[in-house]
Image (cartoon, rainbow, N blue to C red):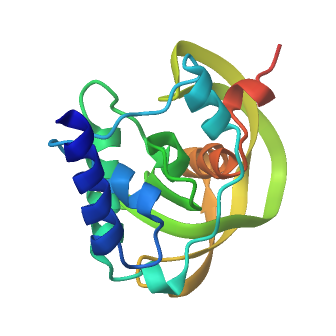
Amino acid sequence: MKRIIAILFTMVALVSCRGGFTASECDVIFRGEDEVMQVMSVANSADSLLLRSQSLPMSAQMVGSEELATLCRRMLATVSAPEHDGVGIAAPQVGILRRMVAVQRFDKEGAPFEFFLNPEIIATHGEKQVGGEGCLSVPDRHGKVERFQNIVLRYRDVEFVEHTETVEGFTAVIFQHEIDHLDGVLYIDREQK
C-alpha cells in the first residue's frame, strides 16, 4: 500500500511540476505537511555528498511558479524556525541544487530576509577579517573564518530582474557563506586553524 501511495505521489509531482524545476526537486519542495524543510547535514553521508555538489542556475521559467513561491516560503520558515534561527540559507541546504539563497539584510531597515537568484560576487574590496561562523548544515559547531567585509554582488531578484550592489559588514559575510554553499564549499573548508 505504501508503495502505491509513493508511486501516486510521484506521478502527481511529475504532472503538477511546472516552472522549470525537475520532478525530484518538486518532490522536495512539496514534501511534508509543515513549512519547515529538512536541513541537509554533514553528519549524514548522502546529505554531505549533496552539500558538496555544484548547484545549477535558476531560470526565467521558474519565476512566478508555484514551485518557486513554495520554495521561498518554506526556506524562510526553515531558516527562521526557533530550532535553526539562522541568518541565511542556500537552496542546497534543503536539498535543492539550485543557485538561490536567502539572506537576512542587516544592512537594511528592519533586517529583512531577501531572496537572491544566481548570486555572484564580482568584486571584493579591502582586507579580509576573521570572524565567527556557524552553519545549519554543520550542527553543534562554530569556527573562525576570514572573509571580505566589502563585496560587489550581482544577482537576479525573484522577478528575474538583474541587480548589482555593494554590500558591507556582516551582511557581506553572510553572502559569502551562502554563495559558497552553491559551489559545494562549507565554512569548515575555510576555517582558520
Question: Image check: 51 left or right of 171?
Answer: right
Left or right: 92 in relation to 16? right
Residue at 56% of width from left, 13% of height from top? Answer: 141
> Is residue 40 visible in this depiction of the protein?
yes
Task: Name the image quarter holding the N terminus.
Answer: top left
Locate residue 7, reporting x and y percent.
29, 50
Q: Quadrant of residue 87?
A: top left
Residue 16 vs 121, above or below: the answer is: below
Q: Is residue 191 left or right of residue 178?
A: right
Please tell me which residue is depicted at 72% across the width and 50% down the height of the picture. 183
User: At which x and y percent is residue 8?
Assistant: 23, 55
Classify the position of the C terminus by image quarter: top right
- Could one spot residue 111 in this view of the protein? no
- Residue 182 location, x and y as percent? 65, 52
Q: Report which quarter residue 168 is drawn in.
A: bottom right
Q: Is residue 150 above or below residue 190?
A: below
Q: Residue at x 68, y 33 (%)?
A: 186
Above or below residue 123? Residue 73 is above
| As drawn, 32 above or below 160 | above
Task: Please tell me which residue lies in front, 113 or 76.
Answer: 76
Residue 150 in the image, given as x and y percentages of width and height = 71, 56
Left or right: where does residue 139 sit relative to residue 189? left
Labels in figure, total: 0
Is residue 126 or residue 173 the one in the foreground?
A: 173
Residue occupying the point 36% across, 34% down: 38
